[in-house]
Image: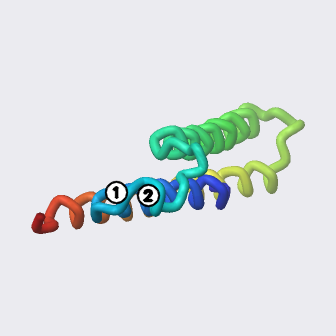
Amino acid sequence: MDTQGIENMLSVLRSTAAQASGKTAESAPAAGGADFAAVLKNSIDKVSATQEQANQMAEKLAAGDTSQNLHEVMIALQTASVSFQEMVQVRNKLVTAYQDMMNMQV
């Protein structure tokens, strides 16, 4: 996951927090034109593409394709696994943040 996407998400969250606290949009940091949903969808699409590529490589290796190197396939599978675990942790943090916001007394 690229750090630019994370920075954009943090910027959007800061902007939303500033609006919720009653500050005007001018005093909140600019979101940089990034839409939170678009950044999140883009990140999920990248994880999905990584998993699909790793699965295709593994299937080709299992079918006996000599152009597939075992080391490259194993690295691709581990990269897909780590990126999926990272996505799950981001989801867990978002769910926790949502639950914290819903439990706030207004």
Residue 85 visible in this rendered orientation of the protein: no
Q: Position of residue 48 (x, y in %)?
A: 57, 40
The amino acid sitting under disc 2 is Ser
Q: CA distance from mark 2 to mark 1?
A: 6 Å
The quadrant where residue 23 appears: bottom left
Viewer-proximal residue among 95 and 81 = 95
Q: Residue at x 54, y 52 (%)?
A: 31
Q: Position of residue 98 (x, y in %)?
A: 27, 58
Relative to 21, is 60 on the left or the right? right
Q: Position of residue 70 (x, y in %)?
A: 79, 51
The quadrant where residue 96 appears: bottom left
Relative to 87, is 22 on the left or the right? left
Viewer-proximal residue among 85 and 102 = 102
Query: Which residue carries the number 1 mark?
Result: 19
Badge 2 vs badge 1, beta-carbon distance below 8 Å: yes
Viewer-proximal residue among 54 and 5 = 5
Q: How is the image coloured?
A: rainbow
Query: Which residue carries the number 2 mark?
Result: 15
Q: Secondary structure at mark 1?
A: helix
Position of 60 relative to 25 (above/below):
above
